[in-house]
Image: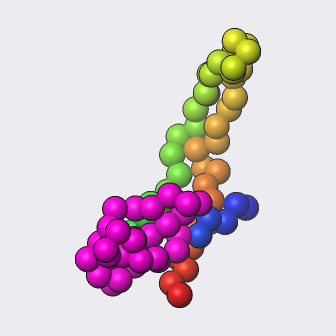
Amino acid sequence: MTVIRYSIVEHDGGWAYQLDGAYSESFPTHKAALRAAKIAAIEQQVGGEDAEIVYQDADGNWHTEHADGGDRPQAEVVDG
């Protein structure tokens, strides 16, 4: 199972959570950023419905893939 980790960091004059170099919006307090990260982590683990994804690659070839809606990562929040 894939594990993703949200980190609480100082950002843009406040606090934010970060995942793979991308920041959330800034929050005025550490506590608010931590709360938002915990909510994001919970929502990240909610499954959806299966779907067929069709896309075209850079060479113009079309591909179809099956996406399992229940295949969700484990999400954690790292504080400190």
Q: Quadrant of residue 33?
A: bottom left
18 drawn magenta: yes
Task: Name the spot of residue 4 as percent of width and height, x first.
Answer: 62, 65
Is residue 75 something one can see in this rendering?
A: yes
Pick the residue in front: 5 or 30. Answer: 30
Q: Quadrant of residue 38?
A: bottom left
* Quadrant where the N terminus is found in the figure: bottom right
Question: Which residue appears farthest toward the front when viewing the image?
Answer: 13
Find the magenta span and give its range.
6-34
Is residue 33 something one can see in this rendering?
A: no
Pick the residue in front: 14 or 45. Answer: 14
Taking 44 as reference, is 35 above or below it?
Answer: below
Taking 16 as reference, is 2 above or below it?
Answer: above
16 drawn magenta: yes
Q: Is residue 51 left or right of residue 30?
A: right
Task: Name the spot of residue 13 as percent of width and height, x first.
Answer: 31, 74
Q: Quadrant of residue 20?
A: bottom right
Task: Name the spot of residue 15 as percent of width and height, x first.
Answer: 36, 75
Pick the residue in front: 16 or 4. Answer: 16
Q: Residue at x 64, y 37 (%)?
A: 67
Q: Residue at x 69, y 29 (%)?
A: 65
Question: Which residue appears farthest toward the bottom when viewing the image?
Answer: 80
